[in-house]
Image (cartoon, rainbow, N blue to C red):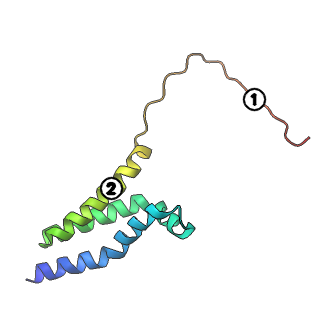
Amino acid sequence: MLGRLLGGLVVLAVLPIAIASVAGFFGAWSWGLDLAAAFRPQYAVVLALASLLAGILGRRGGAFFLALLALLNAALVAPLWFPARAPAPQSSAIKLHYHNVHG
């Protein structure tokens, strides 16, 4: 009984982070919402830890919801951590482009 109560408190405590995570998807409508998208790695970590804790404490539904949001945020950030390999350069020559834009 106490475990489920604590699990509910964990889900309730992390709810503002989950809302901010979803708000980041609506950044095209407001710069304030766009700022929420900057913290996706932090959202992923906090939501994953909260999901694990809520699952251990018996809140399976809340744990699933938090894990889903954590995976979504991690999937959006993962390509930045693991970029595709760039093709090897064909030559070792360096091209320099100079443009005078002042006049």
Judged left or right of residue 71, residue 1 is left
Q: Where is residue 100 in the image (x, y as percent from the top left)?
A: 85, 37
Visible residue check, residue 52: no
- Distance CA(mark 1)–CA(mark 2): 41 Å
The residue indicated by pointer 2 is: 72
Residues 26 and 62: in front is 26
Q: Residue at x 56, y 16 (%)?
A: 90
**Residue farthest front in this picture:** 29
Q: State the image quarter where residue 59 is shown.
A: bottom left
Q: Residue at x 41, y 59 (%)?
A: 40
Q: Which residue extends farthest left? A: 1
Under circle 1, the secondary element is loop
Name the residue nearer the viewer: 81 or 61. 61
Q: Mark number for residue 30?
A: none
Q: Which residue is drawn at 92% across and 40% down?
A: 103
Residue depicted at 84% across the width and 40% down the height? 101
Q: Residue 63, percent across and down?
A: 20, 67
Q: In this view, does 10 lie to the left or right of 59?
A: right
Question: Which quadrant is the N terminus positioned in?
Answer: bottom left
Task: Identify residue type, mark 1.
Answer: His
Q: Do the residues labelled 1 and 2 touch (CB within 8 Å)?
A: no
User: Circle 1 sits on which residue?
Assistant: 97
Residue 4 position in % (x across, y down): 12, 79
Residue 70: x and y, percent?
Answer: 30, 60
Circle 2: element type? helix
Residue type, numbered disc 2:
Leu
Tell me which corner region of the image, top left, top right, bottom left or bottom right, holds residue 31.
bottom right
